[in-house]
Image: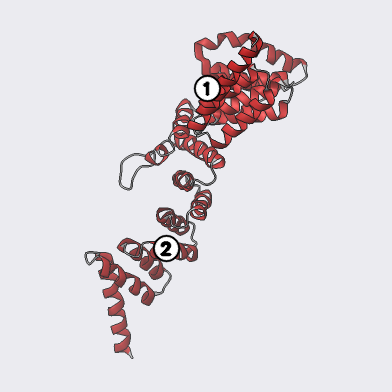
């Protein structure tokens, strides 16, 4: 066996090891990235792309994979596709200096001077004192922009550091988003830019994992806290479309439809919740309240009686049933 053949055999053993790691840990981005890097070094770029696409379909935190794939595509001159992946990486991990820097450089290589300068500004900001090395490149970009007859674009407001940090945290652990929302009666409230960071992270995660009902539920809660009722309704309904037995999403939809003045939809979802949890007194109380507010006292009383059967201590249900009975007695006396 020649030395060359031995090296090839060794390489395939390494490939088998790396592919084994991918199979063992499909939800971690690192094994996919390591395999792709090895394939690139072996001159097998097409298979590296395939490995990265497979990683994007299964990894929980795909920012690094989008970054690597974007660089690979741009390096091959496929700037449109490459820039899309680099932009996704920045959206998924907005605080990563290397991601923003590489997006800026790739835009410059593609001849997109204005957007390259915009990203370079953000990269310098993220790098702080260590960003001085990019300052000269930023000046070159701005000069090229002026010479091309354009004025530096007015950059849109960038997320605050707190917002970007929350976006990164929620992207890693989506359950954190719900913890940002104060419970009823709790003091204080989350800053709006912080909630927007959480919303961005949840929206990106939901787009990547469209079958995860919990992501849409969290997105609905955050949108509600931001006062975006229609967006919150849409997210809650998506959660229910994925999991029709998701009673918490059902009750959230009831609250949102009430806020939007859509009593008929609130009633429909409340009856759905009552079917899912017929032993929850609070659900029947909520249904009774909806029916009472629609001027349907007899139906409301039925719902309240059901709540009393399940929990005799419910004072609201007891008072409502008594009020309906008194109203009926008065009508009988008048007759």
Residue situated furthest left in the rendering: 313
Q: Which residue is drawn at 49% across and 57% down?
A: 260
Q: Measuring from the top left, give residue 49's x and y in whole percent.
A: 65, 28
Asked if one can make out residue 297 in the rendered structure from this viewpoint, the answer is yes
Q: Measuring from the top left, give residue 223's x and y in whole percent.
A: 48, 45
- 10 Å crowding of disc 1: few (<14), some (14-19), many (20+): some
Viewport quadrant of the N terminus: top right
Quarter where residue 172 is shown? top left
Asked if one can make out residue 122 in the rendered structure from this viewpoint, the answer is no
Q: Distance between the residues labelled 1 and 2?
A: 44 Å
Quarter where residue 134 is shown? top right
Considering only vertical position in the picture, is 207 above or below 241?
above
- 10 Å crowding of disc 2: few (<14), some (14-19), many (20+): many
Considering only vertical position in the picture, is 275 above or below 131?
below
Q: Residue at x 73, y 14 (%)?
A: 144
Viewport quadrant of the C terminus: bottom left
Earlier in the chain: of badge 1 and badge 2, it is 1
Q: Which residue is drawn at 61% across and 29% down?
A: 51
In the rendering, which numbered label is found on residue 131?
none
In the rendering, which numbered label is found on residue 270?
2
- Of 27 and 226, nearer the camera is 27
Q: Name the residue under label 1.
A: 96
The structure's colour scheme is secondary structure
Element carrying mark 1: loop
Residue situated furthest bottom in the rendering: 335
Element carrying mark 2: helix
* Callouts 1 and 2 close, C-beta under 8 Å: no
């Amino acid at each position: 066996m020649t030395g060359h053949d031995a090296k090839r055999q060794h390489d395939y053993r390494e490939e088998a090891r790396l592919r084994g790691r991918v199979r063992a840990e499909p939800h971690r981005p690192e094994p996919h990235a390591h395999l792709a890097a090895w394939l690139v070094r072996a001159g097998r770029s097409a298979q590296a792309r395939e490995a990265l696409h497979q990683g994007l379909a299964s990894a929980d935190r795909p920012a690094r994979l989008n970054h690597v794939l974007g660089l690979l595509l741009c390096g091959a001159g496929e700037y449109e596709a490459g820039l899309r992946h680099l932009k996704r990486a920045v959206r998924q991990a907005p605080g990563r200096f290397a991601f923003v820097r590489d997006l800026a450089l790739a835009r410059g290589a593609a001849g997109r001077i204005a957007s390259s300068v915009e990203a370079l500004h953000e990269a310098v900001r993220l790098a702080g004192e260590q960003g001085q090395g990019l300052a000269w490149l930023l000046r070159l970009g701005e000069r090229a922009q002026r010479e091309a007859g354009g004025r530096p674009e007015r950059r849109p407001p960038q997320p605050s550091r707190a917002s970007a940090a929350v976006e990164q945290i929620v992207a890693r652990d989506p359950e954190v988003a719900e913890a940002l929302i104060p419970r009823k009666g709790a003091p204080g409230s989350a800053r709006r830019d912080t909630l927007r960071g959480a919303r961005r992270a949840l929206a990106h995660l939901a787009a990547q994992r469209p079958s995860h009902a919990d992501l849409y539920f969290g997105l609905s809660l955050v949108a509600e806290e931001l006062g975006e009722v229609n967006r919150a309704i849409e997210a809650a309904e998506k959660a229910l479309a994925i999991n029709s037995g998701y009673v918490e999403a059902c009750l959230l939809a009831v609250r949102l439809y009430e806020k939007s003045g859509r009593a008929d939809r609130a009633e429909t979802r409340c009856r759905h919740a009552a079917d899912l949890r017929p032993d929850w007194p609070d659900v029947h109380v909520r249904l009774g309240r909806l029916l009472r507010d629609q001027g349907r006292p007899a139906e409301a009383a039925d719902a309240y009686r059901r709540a009393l059967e399940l929990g005799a201590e419910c004072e609201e249900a007891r008072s409502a049933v008594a009020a309906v009975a008194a109203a009926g007695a008065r009508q009988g006396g008048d007759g």
